[in-house]
Every structure is written in C-alpha cells, then in structure tokens.
Image: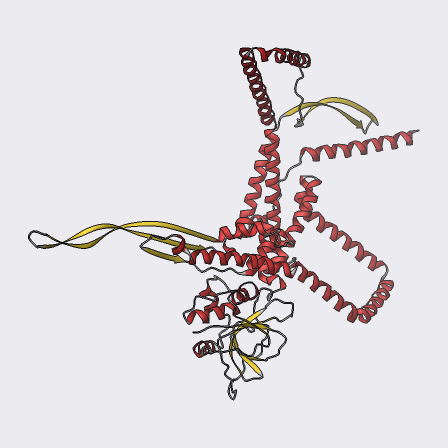
Amino acid sequence: MERVGAAHTRKSSKKAAQRAQREAAAKEKSSRLQFTEEELSTPELEKYVKKSNEAADRLDAARAAIPKEKKLVKERTFDEATGKGKTRLHFEEREKPPGFKEKHNPLSRPAQEAGVFVHNKIHSVEKDNSGVEGAHKSEELAECGAKYGARKVREGYRSHKLKPYREAAKAEKAAFKANVNFQYHKTLHDNPQLTSNPLSRFWQKQKIKKQYRDAAKKGGAAAAKGSAAAAKETAKKTEQAAAFVARHPAGVALTVAALLLFIMVSAGLSSCGAMFSGLMNGVLGTSYTSEDSDLVATESNYAAKENELQQRIDNIERDYPGYDEYRYDLDSIGHNPHELASYLTALLQSYTPQSAQAELDRVFNRQYELTLTEEVEIRYRTETSTDPETGETTSEEVPYEYYILNVTLKNHQIDSFVSEFLNAEQLEMYRVYLETSGNKPLIFGGGSPDTSASEDLSGVDFVNGTRPGNTAIVELAKQQVGNVGGRPYWSWYGFNSRVEWCACFVSWCYGQMGLSEPRFAACQSQGIPWFTSHGQWGARGYENIAPGDAIFFDWDLDGSADHVGLVIGTDGQRVYTVEGNSGDACKIKSYPLDYACIKGYGLMNWN
C-alpha cells in the first residue's frame, strides 16, 4: 500500500508540474526574439534587430491594453515530505475574451408587436384622411431614423469594445513579419551564396516563414529558440551515431564497404537522373506558365493598343483643327514584351488574352501619358493703311492671338512601375521571370541563337530583280557588323536596358534612312502585322526580293516569327542578310531560298 501510495503521489506530482509548466509558458507567450551578442554586433543586421524589437514592444503594449478579468482557479499541490495533496483556490488575472453579450430587454418583443398592431390600424384608415396619412408617414420616418441611430450606436459601442483586440492582432501580424524578415536576412548574411540567385532567395524566405509560423504555434519561446533547438537535436543524433560506431566497428566497416560498392555500380545511372530532375525543377520554376499561343496573343493585344495610340497621335491635326501651330514632345511608343509577360505571370500565374485584358488596360494607362494643352500667345503683325484724303501711308503693330496645341507623350517603361502593382513575393518572381525570359527568349521575336562567325561576301554575284532596292541601307547595315549587345539600337528605340534587339536593329536602319515606319520591337506581334496590313508581304519562296527588304524567321516552326534581319540580296540560290542579335552581335548570314525556317519577307517600297 505504501508503494502504491508513493507511485500515485509521484504521478500526481508529475501531472501538476506539467500543468504548471504549460500555464507558465502561456503567461510568458511573446513574439520577442532573443538575439545573441554576435547578432547584435553585426552592422548588416542592426536595422532588422531594431525593427523586430520595436514590433515586439508594440505587441506587448497592445496586449497590455486588452481588458482583463479575474478568474477563480483551483490549484492542486503535493507536499513531498508528507506525501499528501492540498487544494487551494485563488484568483488569477487573464485576458477577457473578445465576445460579449448585449443585455436583452424582456419587454422589447411585446412592445414591437404592439407597435405593429397600432401601425396596421392606422394604415387601414389613413387613406380617408390625407392629414392622418402625412402624420403617419412622418412618424414612421422618425421611427426608422431612431432605429438607425440606435443601431449605429450599438455598432460603435461594439467596435470600441473590440478595438484593443484588433490592435493586438494587427501588432502580432507586424511582429511576425519583422521576425521573419530578421531571420531571412540573417540567413542571407550567413549564406552569401544565396544572394546571387533570386529564386533561391524567394524559396528560402518561404521556408523561413513556414518554420517560424510552425514554431510560433508552440509559443513565443519556441519561436525564439527554434534554430538552437534544431541544432542541439542534430548534435544529439550525431553523438548517438558515433557511440553506435564505437560499439560495432566491424559491422559498420562491412556495411560501409557494401554501400561503397553499390554506389560505384549505380552512380552512372542515378547521377544523370538526379541531374535531369534538378534541372527540370529549376526550368519549370522560372518558365512562363501560360500557353505559347496565349503569350503571343496577349502581346499582340497590347501592341494593338500601342498602334491605336500612334494612330491617335498621327491624326491630332485632323481631330483638333484650327490651331496656328502644333508642337510635339513625344517619347517613343514601345515596350519590352518580356517585361509585360513576366509581370502578368507573376501576378496571374497562367493567363489568356481574355483573363489578362483588365491588367493590360491598367498597365497601358500607367505606361503611356498623353496630354493635349492649348496655349495662346499674343503676337504682333504689321498692318499698313492709306489715308484716302491725304494719300499718306502709315504702318502700325497690331496684336493678335496665336493658338498653339502642345502634344506631349510620356512613356514610363513597365519595369519602372511594376513594384506599385505587385507585392514583395510577386515582385521577386517577376525579377526571376525577367532574368530568365521565362526560358522562352525567342517567343516574341528575340533573335538568333547562332554564335558562328559572320560570313564573307567576297566572290558573291548578286542577281537583281525587277523591284528597286536600297543599296544605301544595305551599306549602313553592313557597317554595323561586329557590334555586340545592340545598345545603340535598343536605346534609340527607347528602352532603358537591353532587350532582344533584332527588330530594334532593323527599325533603326529604316529610321536612319528617314523613315518613321515600319518601326517595331517584336516580330510576330508588331513587325509582320505592319507589312501585312500595308499589302507588303511575301511568303517564303517569294522570288522578287530586293536589298533592304525585311526577312523574318521561325526557328521552331510553330507559326510565330522569332527573328528578323535585312536582305542584302540573292545570288539565285541563297539569300544574304545582315542581322542584329545573331548570337548577341551584328552578323552577315546566308540561307537557301527554300530554307524551312524563313517565314517570309517584309517588302519595302523605296519610291
């Protein structure tokens, strides 16, 4: 009996101790991180430590403002000397639950029924007396106003009572964000290799957020010491493994030898599979998720909006007649197709032209700012008059109003304002997609992957067709051979950073010849539509090409143009070209006239 009693006492004491620990942990619940001396002395982390402490201070203050209530608690303690238990009652201060009940008036229901009965009686007779009807309507309106005011007072009272709880929830969310931000930047500080890869930084932050959230569910102390606990657990497992090896050296040696033999046999088979799997995961995580046809169609829709804007500017003098002068201050019209696709993918994930239409309108209205401003100047002109009696001629300066219409177009490139439309995680993914071009760099007409050397034209005999070409633009294009990076061409077009620049190169050449059109930065969505809409298109196999024509290529034969260059001429068997962005350089190339990847020709009229 003594042993049974002692066991019962130990079991009860253990439960009481565990309950006390849980209650103590609940009292100590806090989102405040505990920083080491090394973390506090690191300059790169100083800002994030400060923000974490400030957020924790605001959370503690918000929790302190929550109403408290006294709760009667029964506590069971055990005296180890006597082995007897004692029970005592005491009041404990706890946070008052946010819910509360309104006082119910038992007379409200009978009063409501009586009011309905009275109104019904008045309704039955008010049609016979307009005065009674007007008074009754006024009374009902007053009652509705009184009820509305009473309801708003109750809602305001409720909102006032719940304000401390809302503030605490808001402060807790801010503290969570500040703590995760510190953990994230501490990880980047401890692992500098992560800063070079935007995708690694993004996934690392998501992992830290999940780990911190799981730890926070277990209490503030667990959230603050989660990393240290994980490290201790790893060390403990390592010590156990070392002890096992010390006890069984022979068995461990045989096992290691067998594993080495197995690894040597299977290494050739498994390494390729693992490499391929890792590569595929990386590619899928950085690729545009929409169908290629939807990507191209959405880009075409945006290019159509830009064409409409250009037409509106071209027709300004027709649509706004009567001005003495029209002054134009116009930025170039154009955008980076990969900036638009990266933005839409980061925001919408997979999209179609229909689902992306609202975003296209929002981005277009933010990118282009067209303003028309009327200006009136007082000018003077000399007017001469002759006196009919004396025949004397006099001249005088007469003022008149001179009307000017100022037309201004500002182009804010998409990359300059996407941060206004995306949250931090979406912006991180936007940078990843833009950096990789969604693993589809040629989908909008990006260039040629050909890295071979430029070809030599010496000894080539060109055959002249009946269409007149332009040798001047050919000589200009040949002078650009050797340029790498295409900066003169994409910056001339209006881009602030490098884009796939084959179309910009062709447009630049036309612009140097004094032509404002065709001007395009994308092959499939802008270049080909211009030539086809003007009746200046020749499909592959067109025989009468001329120097200065544009030649479009479809490398993957999917029906969409991937590249464009300028025609130098043909010898009857091959067509010779000057191409920008051929392996990121300007080069001279040639192809058989029946080459399958030639999509067609943009035919230029030089007369």
- Residue 518 place in picture, x, y as percent: 48, 67
Q: Is residue 382 above or below residue 56?
A: below
- Residue 476 place in picture, x, y as percent: 44, 76
Quarter of the image that includes the C terminus: bottom left
Q: Is residue 119 left or right of residue 605?
A: right
Please state which of residues 359 and 106 is positioned toward the viewer in this rendering: 359
Please state which of residues 349 and 31 is positioned toward the viewer in this rendering: 349
Q: Can residue 14 be seen by looking at this rendering?
A: yes
Image point (49%, 53%), residue name: 367
The figure's colour scheme reads secondary structure
Q: Is residue 318 left or right of residue 218?
A: left
Q: Is residue 388 above or below residue 482?
A: above
- Residue 325 place in picture, x, y as percent: 32, 56
Q: Residue furthest left?
A: 390
Image point (49%, 63%), residue name: 497
Please state which of residues 584 and 173 is positioned toward the viewer in this rendering: 584
Image point (53%, 59%), residue name: 303
Quarter of the image that includes the N terminus: top right
